[in-house]
Image (cartoon, rainbow, N blue to C red):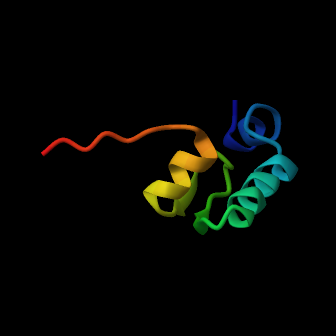
Amino acid sequence: MSVSELTAHHYPQDSRYRALAQWLRAKGLKVHRTYGNRLTLEVSGTVAQAQKHWAVNFLWCA
C-alpha cells in the first residue's frame, strides 16, 4: 500500500484534522506545526490549559 493510499483511506480526514487544530487554537493553545499525513500536530500551552481541557492532572515529583 502506498503512502498516498494510507493517507487517503486510513489516516484522519483532512477536515477533522483541521477542525482539531482549530479547536486547540480556540482553547488558547498554539499550533506550531501540522503534517501532511495528518497524524501529528505540534502544540504548546500551559500545564493549566492541558489540565483544564483534557481533564488530566500532572504530579510533580522533586
8 relative to 28, above or below: above
Residue nearer the viewer, 35 or 47: 47
Residue 41, position in %: x, y?
59, 55
Q: Residue at x 18, y 41 (%)?
A: 61
Q: Residue at x 79, y 57 (%)?
A: 18
**Is 34 situated left or right of 46 in this image?**
right
20 relative to 25, above or below: above
**Is 55 situated left or right of 36 in this image?**
left
Quarter of the view holding residue 54: top right
**Is 49 situated left or right of 6 in this image?**
left
Residue 44, position in %: x, y?
50, 63
Residue nearer the viewer, 62 or 40: 62
25 relative to 5, above or below: below
- In the orientation shown, which residue stands out farthest toward the left? 62
How many numbered circles are shown? 0
Q: Residue at x 68, y 57 (%)?
A: 36
Residue 22, position in %: x, y?
77, 62
Quarter of the view holding residue 55: top right
Q: Residue at x 60, y 65 (%)?
A: 29
Residue 1, position in %: x, y?
69, 29
Residue nearer the viewer, 3 or 23: 23
